[in-house]
Image (tube, helix red, strand yellow):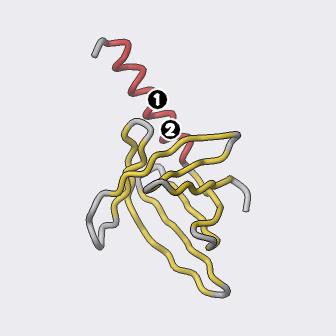
């Protein structure tokens, strides 16, 4: 890999990571969810069902256009394709797409 390609790859990784930061809202399998990406590589997923909520705490990193998550309590990296469309974050895991937006 040439120096310019290496710099472009680092820049692209940094751009994806920067764009992920903050809160995102959407639905997963019909269930309301909120996701928050922190700058320190921590990720919180909150699933809402009626008056109940389930919080899953993960760590994350970026590998190209892939979001790599891991749950410290049950370590196993999970790779999810990530892209942006019209300001929304599209995550694709095992052929299923989830669209998240900045507003609830």
Mark number for residue 96? Answer: none
For the point 52% across and 79% down, which residue is it?
54
Q: Is residue 32 left or right of residue 39?
A: right
Q: Which mark is residue 16?
A: 2
Q: Residues within 10 Å of mark 2 (few under 14, many from 20)?
A: some
Quarter assignment of residue 31: bottom right
User: In the depicted view, which residue is nearer to us: 39 or 47?
Assistant: 47
Specify the quadrant that holds the N terminus.
top left
Crowd tier of the residue under label 1, counting other residues whose Cα lies within 10 Å: few below 14, some 14–19, many 20 or above: some
Q: Is residue 62 above or below residue 2?
A: below
Q: Position of residue 86 (x, y in %)?
A: 70, 40
Name the residue tied to disc 1. Answer: 12
- Residue 28: horizontal and vertical position, in percent? 58, 66
Q: Residue furthest right?
A: 103
- Position above or below: 26 against 22: below
Residue 19 in the image: above or below residue 75: above
Residue 84, quarter of the rendered image: top right
The answer to whether the residue labelled 2 contacts the one labelled 1, judged by CB atoms less than 8 Å apart, is yes
The structure residue drawn at horizontal position 62% and vertical position 57%, both measured from the top left corner, is: 24
Residue found at the very far bottom of the displayed protein = 51
Q: Secondary structure at mark 1?
A: helix
Q: Secondary structure at mark 2?
A: helix
| Number of numbered discs on residues | 2
Q: Is residue 91 left or right of residue 79?
A: right
The reply, left or right, for residue 76 in relation to residue 31 is left
Indicate the quadrant containing the C terminus: top left, top right, bottom left or bottom right: bottom right
- The span from disc 2 to disc 1 (Cα, nearest Å) is 6 Å
Q: Position of residue 101 (x, y in %)?
A: 67, 53
């Amino acid at each position: 890999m040439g120096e310019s390609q290496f710099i472009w790859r680092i820049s692209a990784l940094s751009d994806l990571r920067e764009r992920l930061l903050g809160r995102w809202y959407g639905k997963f399998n019909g269930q309301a969810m909120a996701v928050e990406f922190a700058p320190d590589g921590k990720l919180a997923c909150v699933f809402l069902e009626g008056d109940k909520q389930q919080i899953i705490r993960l760590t994350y990193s970026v590998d190209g256009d892939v979001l790599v998550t891991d749950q410290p309590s049950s370590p196993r990296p999970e790779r999810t394709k990530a892209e942006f469309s019209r300001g929304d974050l599209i995550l694709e895991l095992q052929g299923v797409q989830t669209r998240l937006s900045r507003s609830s």
